[in-house]
Amino acid sequence: MKPYIYIFICAILAACSHGKPPQMSPSTEKPDIFPDYADVTIPSRIAPMNFNIINDNAEHIYVKVTGEKGGELETSGRYADFDEKKWHDLTTQNIGADLSFDVSVKDRDGKWSRYAPFVIHVSDIPLDDYGVVYRKIAPGYQTFSKTGIYQRDISSFEEIPVLEETAVEGKCLNCHYSNRGRNDQFSIHVRGKNGGTILNNGKNLVYLNTKAPETAGNATYGYWHPDGRYIAFSVNKIVQNFYLDKEHNIEPWDVVSDIIVLDTETNRIITSPVVATPRCETTPAFSPDGKKIYFCLADSVTMPGGYDRLKYSLCSIDFDVKSETFGSRIDTLVCAGDLGKSASLPRPSYDGKYLMYNITDYGTSPIHHSDADLWIMDLSTGESRNIAEVNSDCSDAYHNWSTGGGWFLFNSKRLDGMYGNLYFSCIGPDGKATKPFLLPQKNPRLYYDEALHSFNAPDFITEKIDLDMPEVRSMVKSGKTLDVSVKK
Amino acid sequence: MAKEIRNGYGAKASSSSKYILAGIFSAIAVFIYYFWAVPYRAALSYREQLQLFQTTDTYFNSLAGRPGGPATYIGEFLTQFFNDFRIGAAVMCGLMTLFLLICYLVNRKFAPSIPRFTNLSLSLLPFFSMFLFFGNPDVTLTFMIAIIVSAAGTYLFTIADFNRRNAAGKYQPICNKTTRCAITYLLMIAGTSLLYWLAGPASVIFTLTTTAYIYTDREASFLYKAIYATVAVGCLAANIYAWSCILTYPIGYQLTGIGYMMIPDMVYTGQIIVAALCVVVPVLAAVFARMPQKAIAPTLAAVEILAVIFFYPKSYDRTTYRLIDYDYMVRANNWKGILDYSDKHDPDLPLSVSATNLAAGMTGQLDCRAFDYRQHGAEGLIPPFVKETLSSWTTGEIFFQLGMINSAQRFYFEGMEAIPNYNKSGRAIKRLAETAIIRGEYSLAKKYLAILENTIFYKKWAQRNLDLLNNPEAVDKHPLYGSMRKKMIDEDYLFSEGELDKTLGQLYLKDSGNNLAKQYLILYPLLQRDLNKFAQYMGVVAETQPSYNPLLAQQALAFISMKNGQPIPKNIVPQAVEQSLRNFAQAWTSKNPSLLEPYRRTLFHYLLSQE
């Protein structure tokens, strides 16, 4: 080979290889990274916490991760992109310990800077769920382009569609509700022509028309009973109004909303005059023992004029599975009148310790309120508090618990105020929530900059969902639904 | 030479026919360029705004994983140049001419002895059908690229023909039969798979045309041809089946072509005709080559031209294109252009009426000339929301110009989400970035601007605005953003379509310099035929602008006075207006349509009639 070819190859290699930074002391300044992963707590199974440097002048970064209990991991490139297997080896080795991230950045002039290390704590609270499921939807108003329900393996970057709108010929897909993250007991509402509710009751897949002549509307917000036979739904007739001012965009509210329970074995609806009143009852959730239904309740106000007086209390009512009846008394857990605020979306932890819910100034749609915060109630004492550790200035909502308890996820619009993204946190032994972290992506900056969708109604799933797509298509295409009846 | 003599052409004629042919090709290219650059330039903008092509790996990957995805990528890449009609017209000209050329070359492969003009006349069949089909604004460049790629694939297959035919149509095998057969099958199988991925179902052109090509091989046995046809069709079916296993689209989408049309689940006759002609025409070329030539080319050309004349008005629907023209001018804020256009073509649809009112308002003529044009009540001023892109954006533009930034954001967002093929929109994202900047939502604005930085035509604008965001004080001083901020209502309340007049009043009270809001405010009750409200709103305006006395106000005041049997105030209503009202009153009471005709486009007539 001729010398100039060697020179050429060497030049190419030199251009491609930035190498490691020279030996230098770290500064006292921590690196400005996206997502902000400094001091977060992660489960050991989480996908590599790749990150970008927020500095337009940064050309190359070098990261060395050192485990408190041992192990090292290095990466370098345009952004921190960790090898998946090595990452998991390191996190598994360091459960209950810290990972220290030593970051060096080379700028366009070829000058290296070494930053003070930041730390990520690997929690000893396990997160054994397979992953998460969410609906990807533009945070719009009345028209939605392509929507879809997707599942994401929590330990990798793999995202798999559960059901995309294109698969069912342009139908609008609503939220996915499962029984404690199970992949064989879930429901998905399909709206529009030939709409219905796809229901997997653990035995077979059916397509239901959840509107009975006696009920106010279709089943909307749902929550499964732990025994897998019943689902508590609210039936809502939702109207949307739009703001003129600078702060808000949209205010959905219920013209009518009641609570029902659907028996998935008989397709019968159980109602009660106690939770089907002229007042607004919505967003039910069974208690972990299945004996209670938490829900939100508001007195009707004249809408849309009285929109800022629409305040929901957090309530509960007994439900007896054997007799399939609601209790006769509603207990108020958080009184809207006392608080001067509105509660929504109660979600009990599956171990029965906590009840997480949303608080907004008014209304029933926290994802549209920048003031929406997550609150938590200690069910043993009944005491509630704002989870200030995780809340932001933007909407923080659509929360739910991991099936093993401890971890929770929620949707937050903190990145830009418009697009909701998925965050995780856990309740530590001191009862405090850890600093939330954004769902990891291969190249986070690129992903979140380009994404024009929200992660809507997220939840944990224990196993991968595998829908029988031809059957679903056939169901939706035919529009043939099974009618529900009301238990007399 | 024998062929040329048989066809009636000498060597000299052949040489000159080459130049004539080149001349015809050039003339067609010039015509296509002119067609898209002048009368149909708005259609280019229409297509461009229904997509957001980004120069990122993610964008390519999002399309590459489906059959026809690369054609969509190329199609959308080229469509972005429609942002500038001069370049866009050149793109259309280049693609259409390329399509014609490929059709011509494929024909020549099928019939090497076919005379040039017969070949051209035949090639014009798919060309004209494509031209007419493109009159449907729902047809995307993806379709054209897919057809061109499939036809080009066919041509490449015929080039690699190992049983070459010479100019006289004689076969001259260049390798032995087994090798030839193996290579043919290899090409067919690889070509089918590759083309199905590149172009989607348009690759059926390749399958059928190459099969037809094999059938024209006189030396091949019938069994060989039958096996080839079976394998070719089977290979295509296998590709369709294999993709259907991994795609989250119904099989129907795959068969009609994902991305060929804006509306994904529709089957258009035009796309079948274009594809069918790409297959049939080469076969016809082989047939026509054996027929006497004298009358074929002129007859074909004459029939084609007549067909184009007949189908043109159906393909390029005048009503649809007028709406597209209005949308184009609204997008460009070409208010004078809109008024000139409305002077020539009576606006009669909600979008054209509202665009005309907006243009009149923006040029300060609405309070004088509103009734020079057809009116559709208050909804013609600010149309209600419908889930449709163009009308949403036009209404969004009205809100934007009024200073109702939140509503503008909503309508632009809705319009983008209503794009039937799930695309995003450069036009909408740009406006959304602007509304976010005006509202002070800089993080959101940066997100949109970062996306626009990945485009060719919006990049510079995005970078300028990103720089601006680094200096928030400059935003307040910005000629657009600063003035819009002044117009915005501070009070927090829900928008109600039934109470738009109240909102217009608030806009005017917030900024009495908001000339558009002022004109809309006084016109709104007049369009509702509510003279009491009109008087009330004029009072509001008079408090800040006592001298404001536009023609519509004079006419309305004269009308109210006459109606109430009161004297018309001469200090406010000029003599000409009063006289005009008296003449109208006479015409109205006479009930003589011919006398009323001159007043059909007046406020007086509008107030009394229920049209």
Image (cartoon, rainbow, N blue to C red):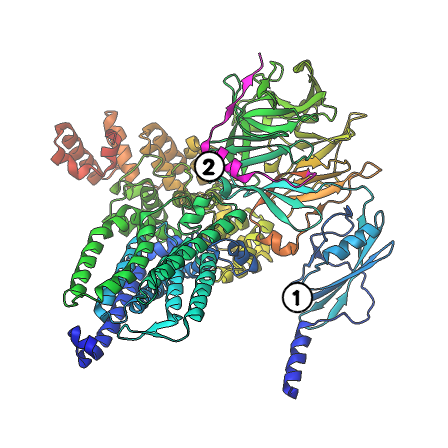
Q: In the picture, residue B93 is in which quadrant?
A: bottom left
Q: Residue at x 60, y 35 (%)?
A: A176
What stretch of residues is rendered in magenta?
A461-488
Element at badge 1?
Answer: loop
Amino acid residing under circle 2: Gln
Q: Is residue A418 visible?
A: no
| For residue B304, above or below residue B530 | below
In the rendering, at what x and y percent does residue A93 appear?
84, 52
**Mark closer to the observer (1, 2):** 1
In the rendering, at what x and y percent does residue A132 appear?
67, 42
Element at badge 2?
Answer: helix
In the rendering, at what x and y percent does residue A221 appear?
60, 29
> Which of these two is toward me, B369 or B27?
B27
| For residue B19, above or below residue A369 | below
Amino acid residing under circle 1: Asn
- Marked residue chain, label 2: B
In the image: residue A253, left or right of residue A459: left
What residue would you read off at disc 2?
Answer: B506
Q: Are marks 1 and 2 in contact (CB under 8 Å)?
A: no
What residue would you read off at disc 1?
Answer: A57
Q: Residue at x 39, y 76 (%)?
A: B174
Marks 1, 2 in one chain:
no
- Disc 1 versus disc 2: distance between alpha carbons? 47 Å
